[in-house]
Image (spheres, rainbow, N blue to C red):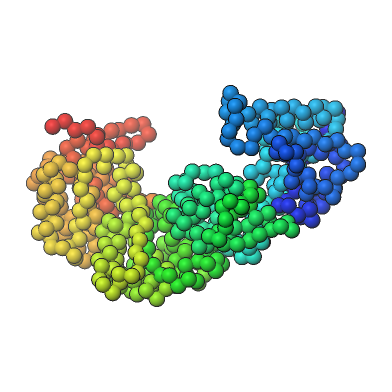
Amino acid sequence: MSGKLWGIGLGPGDSELVTVKAARVIESADVVAYHCARHGNSIARSVAQPYLRDGQLEERLMYPVTTEGTDHPGGYDGALRDFYAASAERLAGHLRAGRDVVLLAEGDPLFFSSYMHMHKRLAGEFDAEIIPGVTSVSASSAAVGIPLVEGEETLTVVPGTLGSQALISRFRTAEAIAVMKLGRTFTRVRDALESAGRLDEAWYVERASTRVQRVLPVSEVNPEEVPYFSMIVVPGPRNNPRHDEASGRGEVVVVGLGPGADEHTTPAVQVELALATDLVGYKTYLARVTPRPGQRIHASDNRVEAERAAFALDLAARGARVAVVSSGDPGVFAMASAVAEVAAESRWHDVPVRVQPGVTAANAVAAAVGAPLGHDYAVISLSDRLKPWDMIEHRLRAAVGADLVVAIYNPGSAARTWQVARLREVLREMVSDDRVVVLGRDVGGPEESLCTTTVGALDPAVVDMRTLLIIGSPATTVVSRSGGDLTYTPRRHDA
């Protein structure tokens, strides 16, 4: 009868953090296996030492390489594949002989652990059970003594072996962060945290839970003294005392929620919303945001953009981290321009201002029907609140006359009821009645509706403020397919 394979999670380093079940299984096993480097020492074995007994067989699985340098014909990955295959066969020999084998793993066996490579090779043939362990993330968080995540905050675990741009991207969009696999990667990770604006929030923990544990700000760490068994943690903004709010450094970031659906809100925007102390915006757009406890909400009417921008800048000048909320993309007929214009005044020159883009309605509507914006196109707002109608009509005629696809924003409202009818009149003067027109309303939202029609069949009565129109070019085509119509403008145009 075959023996049983046990994957034993030992926790982060303190032998007293080994679970009662793990200690019992280690003591009763016939064979104790563990990975080690070429020097032969094993941290896992030292953690398990109090639970070993005399007479147990020990299998020391010595890595052939610990860096990416090797003369193996398959390179570093090839050398490790051969090593794992040979190690699995060694353990299989004991299991086939009826001996129970425990394979020791620091932390948790399925969390960045070598045990998983044995499990994948042996679990199909032998009975295998995993005993979870306390991860280094939990131990490092406990060492820092700050809640890592609370409420709806999310935790991102990142290996330090990623490239610089990948690290920066993840650090910018994450709330709470844990970075593993440091050592030689520390400098790159530290620089990425600085580039992402998160360095001041980050803590370094070395050999968590052991007698030689060290905790200090990442900015104070000597890169030459960082061992592999170390970690960086960035507690979530709700509890991080080194967050910008505590330092009194205010800023304004203008964000775009996207056109309607939560999945259209980018991770970067979600992070900015979570980090903000104050949310400022039109009441309808703020209703799409679920504030966290403690956030201050400042809702206003949609016609006071300059006043809203000045209010946000004033809050930031007094130390608040302000998110000015727009629908779609904040730079497309939205608040980014208003904030930039007001921030250009000398009294606001010391207030940092950033813009975080979002999915705009034109792109959402276009994607919903295919690719009508596949070639050159213009974007025009029919609202004459901030510019005269004569200018709007002049630009509309110029765009249509140039055979551009035209995306029409703000076509009508309760106070503006005639513009769409006039748009149809202009189109019928300039193009044939069969020119493609796409109407998208509340795309991604609960009241989404899509209609592909023509200039001749366009009914102004069905168009409201929440509708976006796409007027096709002469090349825009609608193809009927079994899976539904597909509308596109080819990228190649013949003169």
Residue 341 horizontal side relative to residue 393, left or right: right
Q: Give the quadrant of residue 418.
A: bottom left
Taking the spot 64% from the left edge, 37% from the top edge, the residue there is 66
Q: Quadrant of residue 393?
A: bottom left
Picture mark count? 0
Q: Is residue 56 above or below residue 222?
A: above
Quarter residue 485 falls in: top left
Q: Is residue 285 visible?
A: no
Quadrant showing the N terminus: top right
Residue reaching furthest to the right: 54
Out of 221 and 453, give the one closest to the viewer.
Answer: 221
Give residue 359's position: percent from left, percent from top: 35, 51
Looking at the picture, does residue 210 appear above or below residue 81? below
State the residue at coordinates (13%, 32%).
495
Instruction: Report x, y in % for residue 22.
Output: 80, 48
Along the viewing direction, whichever of 228 and 452 lies nearer the viewer? 228
Q: Is residue 272 left or right of residue 219?
A: left
Q: Nearer the viewer, residue 165 or 334?
A: 165
Q: Residue at x 44, y 62 (%)?
A: 273
404 vs 178, left or right, is: left
Q: Is residue 340 above or below residue 132?
A: below
Coordinates of residue 192 in the picture (x, y in percent): 48, 52
What residue is at 31 percent from the left and 52 percent from the top? 361
Residue 27 x/y as whole percent: 86, 44
- Residue 38 seen in the figure: yes
